[in-house]
Image: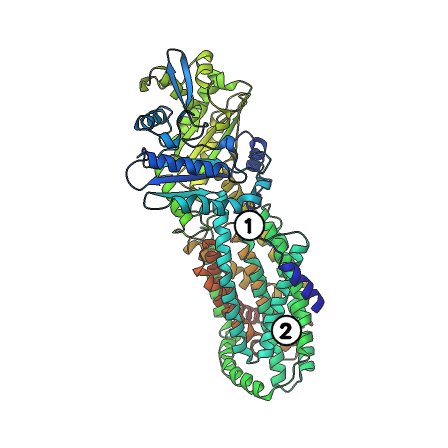
Amino acid sequence: MAIFTIATGYFATGLKLEAGFLKQVPTEHPYLQTYFEYQQEMPGANLVLVALKAKEGTIWNKEILQRLHKITEEISYLPGVDRSRLYSLWYPTTRALTIDEFGFQMEDLIPGTITPERLTDEDIAGIRARTIAGDWIGAIVSEDETSVLVAFEIKAPGGASGDIESAQSTALDVASLLETKIRAPFSDDVSDVAIIGFPKFIGDIAEGAIIATSFFLLAFVITGVAVFAYVRSFILTALAIGCSLVSVVWQLGVLNLIGMGLDPLAILVPFLVYAIGVSHGMQQVNLIATQIAKGSDGLNAARQTFRRLLVPGSMALITDLVGFITLYLIPVGVVRDIAIIATIGVGLKIISNLIMLPLLASYFRRDEKQVRLFIKARVFRERIMTWIAGVAKPGTAPLIAGGLVVVLVGSAIGAQYRHVGDLTPAASELRPDSKYNQDTAFITSNFDVGTDVLVLVLETPQDACINPGYMKYLDAMTRDLSSIDGVLKVDSLASTARIASSISALGNLKWRNLPGTERQLISATAQVDPALGLLNDTCTILPLFIYTVDHKAETIDRLIDEITAYAAAHPLDGVNARIGLGGVSVIAATNQVVEASEAPLLIYVFLTIIILVLIAYVDWRAIICCCVPLLLATSLGYVFMVVFGIGLKVTTLPVLVLATGIGVDYAFYLYSQIRIFQREGFAIADAYHGALLSTGMAVVYASIMLAGGVGTWVFSPLQFQADMGALLAFMFIANMICAIVGLPALAALLERIAPPKHLRAA
């Protein structure tokens, strides 16, 4: 084991932080399949927006435009930037459609004859006029003309812009370079910079994750101090903490060996596995210390502990293992990473905690001073346990069981109000006041664009863009979808054709209508660059870019429902409407997968628990005693999420599964001891009192200790870690209370209602 620890420790040092867009999304969902099909023809999910804001006056002055030119140059040389989809006043992708005596003309907003060094007032006036004529106000220049955007997309080096799987290898590098080369040099008393987009978002999470490791260290210290305060022995404390820590080293080393990295959203998993180990370690050292206090030496104490806790400990860890394996059923990469990482960690816990810990404890030498300290502390805890044991008394148990059922029904009703997805307009993985969310608020409030966009693709016959029938259908859909509550605006080829029609009438808004003939449509759409995503080279797709006010679950659900209903109510031969591009489409797909996976996951976990309990105890009463408190704690977890505004997402669903695993640990440790004492002839109340003294004290103490450790996460710069910490802390306490109070009350009541003919061996 020592050699294995050294080897895995060496490999653990080479574990890398990996961020990937595809890991965050359900790649098998129809929306994502649409994305993959059209990813090379449409703007992708790796869009980045950089806003330059003038602190005084408008952007129409030499200094701001020179800064914009420098920013555009810096961005064009960032790794992975698709220059064909880079939009800036200084880049030839931004053009204005005008009309003169020779017909329609497309010209750059800033012609190549203008240089930043020789900008004149006349040049600036011309740039502004072309920007207005090209309808770029609101798109890349804010409505008040005090800010200007540079938009670009990240692609894989040497690949297509849609090749996002390999593009993410550069995401963290791009995020860092955006700070050092863009924000830092151009944020001063003249201008300010705002940056949003997936690469920046995942970069901020990675940065926060590094800071968040300090909370792991704090939780590690808290658990260490708490274990020592309980067992009053440095050696036993080192065993409980050390064995849990060693298994984490094994876990990280194995991950590197099998070629995996650690996603920022999965960085919490090793600590959660460590917490499971500490929980089991507490049971081990508690029983070892108890046996030593009764006069046993280290070897005999370790043997007795191994015999008494191997079965419940193995059952608990196997249940945890199955729970994490079921997470793999969710077709989202980061959740599957969590499943693999946690499964490896929990599997190794069986060796480190159930085998290695008692093996090392057998060398423990009896220290009379430490024994006296442990006995003194135990006397106080025994008084508390004696009071708690009253829940199993004949007069108390029915009341407790009845209250349990009432709370279960109430919490089940409250759980129905849980929401899937984001409940706030901000990026919920980051704090509402984070720089990224502040930048998002600034850009979305000053421009008609943002990262919250859903792209609806209309698949059509060839040359649909010059077919009046198809274009009228597109125009009507653009207009009708614009009226949906929560939609900022809708862009399509039809709206661009309307602008062209107005320009042909010398800018008269009365003529801002959709051209009605094929010839007029040819004239209006001929100058539209396919790189804009409004059409493709063969005009077989007519996308609608639907910009939303936010990406809250209710906004997305309403939009998806309206689009689906509209497409069903207004069918057109040859047209197939498909959702699938844009950030909102991705979020919608993820929400749908999480919601669809939620019930099967919990059913699989509870079925596993039921099967294991039935195998171990061969008694239907055991199933009720172990599962009902667990079900109550899970329902209360949902109520907690509703009350504190935590949505069910890829980061919180695994927490519920983990918490269920922790809860069944408590149930197994308690119920197995109750059965042992009953087998020795004790009545249920006395048997429960004995179970509390042997394992119950450690259950109570471990849950409070772990809740205190993860509770510090609420101060993390990452909102998702704070949410996970708060939810985990609550679930630790809820599972403990439900197990300590509910399990014995149900056991006592069932024994009175349907007394068993005999008790089988645990």
Give whichever of 424, 262 is nearer the camera: 262
Name above or below for residue 548 compared with residue 128. below
Q: Residue lying at the far front in this picture: please name it.
A: 118
Q: Secondary structure at mark 1?
A: helix
Give whichever of 388, 55 is nearer the camera: 55
Q: Point out which mark residue 675 bears.
A: 2
| x, y percent for residue 524 | 43, 17
| x, y percent for residue 699 | 55, 71
Identified by mark 2, the residue type is Arg
Give the color scheme: rainbow, by chain, secondary structure or one colour. rainbow
Location of the N terminus (image quadrant): bottom right
- Residue beneath label 1, please? 598
Distance Cα–Cα, label 2 vs label 1: 33 Å
Give whichever of 638, 83 is nearer the camera: 83
Q: Looking at the image, is mark 2 or mark 1 nearer the viewer? A: 1
Disc on the earlier residue, 2 or 1 = 1
Circle 2 crowding by C-alpha within 10 Å: few under 14, some 14–19, many from 20? many
| x, y percent for residue 278 | 58, 69
Inspect this view and state whether residue 754 appears. Answer: no
Circle 1 crowding by C-alpha within 10 Å: few under 14, some 14–19, many from 20? some
Identified by mark 1, the residue type is Glu
Name above or below for residue 635 compared with residue 118. below
| x, y percent for residue 16 | 59, 53
Residue 349, quarter of picture: bottom right
Location of the C terminus (image quadrant): bottom right
Residue at the spot x=59%, y=32% of the render? Answer: 37
Name above or below for residue 735 compared with residue 323. below
Residue at the spot x=55%, y=46% of the render? Answer: 24
Q: Secondary structure at mark 2?
A: helix
| Figure label count | 2
Residue at the spot x=49%, y=16% of the render? Answer: 467
Inspect this view and state whether residue 204 appears. Answer: yes
